[in-house]
Amino acid sequence: MIDKFFASQALASLACNGTKGISISIANSGAINGLIPLIGYDESQIPNLATLSEEFSLEKNPAQLALEHLFEEDDVRGGVSTAHKAIPLLVDLLRPIPGRPGALPIAVELLHRIAEGSDTNKLIMSEAGALEALTKYISLNPRDPNEASISELLRVLFKNTDLIRHEVALNCLTHLIAILRFSCRDARFSAARALHELFSAEKIKNCDLARQVVQPLIDMVNIAESESEQQSVLATLIKLTSGSNASKAALFFDIDGNALETMYNILSTSPSVELKGSAAQVCYVLFSNKKFRETPIAPECTEPLISLIQSPSVSAAESAVWAFERLLSDVQLVEHISANDTILDLLISLVSGTEYRLIEGSVSVLIKLGKDRAHRKQDMVRAGILDKCLDLLPHASMPCCSAIAELFRILTNSGAIARSPEAAKIIEPLFDLLLQPDFSLWGKNSALQALMNILEKPQCLTTLRLTPIQTIEPLISFLESPTRELQHAGTDVLSHLLVQEHFQQDITTKNAIVPLVRLAGIGILTLQQIAVAALERISTSWPKEVVDAGGIYEISKIIIQDDPEPTLELWEAAALIISNLLQFNAEYYYRVPLIVLVRMLQSTLESTIKVALNALLVHDRADKSSAEQMVEAGVVDALLDLMRSHHCEELSARLLEALFNKARVREIKITKDAIAPLAEYLLDPQTTTETCKLFAALALGDLSQQEGHARSSDSVSACRALVSLLEDHPSEDLTMVAVCALQNFVMHSRTNRRTVAEAGGILVIQELLISPSADVAAQAAVLIRLLFANHTLQEFVSTELVRSLTGTKKIVTLKTFRY
């Protein structure tokens, strides 16, 4: 031992007094491995060496002295072989060794030096079991005087991100919390600094155990004797509560004392701007919760925060402005602050330069101050906020650009601002922003909403100088976005642009057709409304492309959509698109389902109804079986409604007659219900067109061929209507149709015969017996014969009737007029 003692004395002398080269040579010689076993001995274990040291004025702990000097050299600490050999030996000293009570604090100090600045050495220590040894020591030795140095070593070790993910790290959390609660002052602040590093691990920061840190940390802020101590504790609190999780404020709910009051005291009284900045960061967390914003002390924070915003320290001003922004989530406070012109001017002045986080915070405050306050928005515009923001957009960070886009949205919600020349200047920069790949979803949505606010004003559209490539191309990607809000906003902006004819006709617009068609059939009313409005404007310029994109199929779904039921505006627009496509090419008639064409008859637009009627007539001529499908789809009621309202009545009557002319259609029970409406139509004074009357009479004649229909109770009204028609002396064709229809109605019904007679039909028909038209006279004679068959209606026989019949030149056999 004496030899080792004197050897260590020599090495200590060389290390303390020699050059850097000598220290490196000592380290490379392997002497460090011999010095480590000599440290930490109690003087009682080596009394002779202690006596020698005193007698010859030698160092009492030469090995410790030599190691301390050697590890001051970067080349020694970073030497791979030295670290690999020395670290395990020093870690062994972290475990209790009989007779060497001083070994542990010396080993901790040396390991601290070796670990500082070297992640490799930290990992070697971990592999050697340093974390386990340190954790075990502080768990077995509460309130030990070495806790402060051990906590400092843990702080250094936890700077390595691999170590904070070590499973032992979570166990360290428990013991560091115990130090915070029960140990001496120095140990507590060292533990707080170690926790600051440990909380870099999300898993540890978010665990339930971490909640126990808050109370002792707040207590330490209140008892700290220096700004540095307060700063270290606040830094740990900030790290613990960092992140986007708004529930972090709940960590402060159940603590003794008022955390916000503690922060307010710092903001109000501390001379340190940096410390105030840290307090503002904690306020930012606290103000995320309504409970803290509603405390009496919260409004008192306004003044010191505003003062801090004006400080020369950018980081402190940034923290203050974001805490202020959170505080303004309180509506009443916003009302109070928004009336302060000085604060508004201050915030607008900050919207410049390159400190984008500070600018973003200032813009976010302006958003809250301007929302729903038209006069404040005007004040901001007059103060030049639009120009300031436009100057920033080309080079600002994307989060800052997102905030600016939201401010533009808020400002342009004011119609007066949206119509102003100043607002027109932001259109092109916003379209440029939309092309940025890292622009946030929130920013994109805000930009689109702002554009919509401006472009929905007609005067803005007429003065727009951007090309379709600059405007439509950026919007197309949003039509296929998985985010509904972006789809909605992007489609809305596109729809407004397509009001302009040159946008409709531009080749770029073709690329928007496919996504617009998909949106039209998506079944979400808000999206359908906007997509269909856009397609309505495109369908006349690019009809073939709309059809090729599946437009007929998707738009047709809207016409028959029940859940959700489309608005009348949406329905009409969809019907108009189908109408536009069918007018472009008649071959498309066959692509539209019959039920859709039938539903289109309910449109309020005559042009749409005409197209649908023409399409249905084409279907009827091309496919006889289509008539039954039309009837099942409700075409009869739709056509009768059109005739009653005298809209497209000629086409409607033509199609109705064509349908009823088919025996299989007449066999459908519901066709009987058309008799009364047709009779009313013939009796309607507004029914003036000869052609319409002809088709209506033909339709009644068709229905009368069905015996069941001819016997129905409604046939009485048909007989009256036909007699009335004959009384007006219509054309020969119409007279023939009416007489033949009456023949069918009276053939099988005694009631109908009497109805005709009582309606004055015999006198009318008697006149027809002397008609110059032989065909008319012959059919009239047949009708007379049917009326008086079976000796009915004898009371209506007159001399004039007999004379008229006698004057008939030929006998007519009973028959039904065939159409």
Image (tube, rainbow, N blue to C red):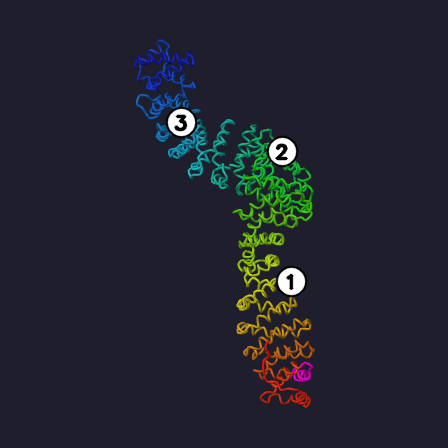
Comes first in the chain, label 1 or label 2: 2
Mark 1, residue position: 606
Q: Quadrant of the C terminus?
A: bottom right
Above or below 61: residue 592: below
Along the viewing direction, whichever of 197 and 335 lies nearer the viewer: 197
Above or below 662: residue 208: above
Mark 3, residue position: 122
The question of residue 767 being in magenta is answered with: yes
- Numbered disc 1: secondary structure: helix
Left or right: 794 in relation to 97:
right
Number of numbered discs overlaid on the protein picture = 3
Comes first in the chain, label 2 or label 3: 3
x then y, percent, for residue 185? 44, 27
Depth check, mark 1 against mark 2: the one in front is: 1
The span from disc 1 to disc 3 (Cα, nearest Å) is 84 Å
Residue at 54 percent of width and 52 percent of height: 518
Residue 264 is labelled as none
x then y, percent, for residue 370? 63, 42
Mark 2, residue position: 352
Task: Specify start and end residues of the magenta stretch as a single range.
Answer: 758-773
Depth check, mark 1 against mark 3: the one in front is: 1
Q: Is residue 42 visible?
A: no
x then y, percent, for residue 771? 69, 82
Quadrant in which residue 753 is drawn: bottom right
Query: What amino acid is labelled 1 in the image?
Result: Glu
Query: What amino acid is labelled 3 in the image?
Result: Lys
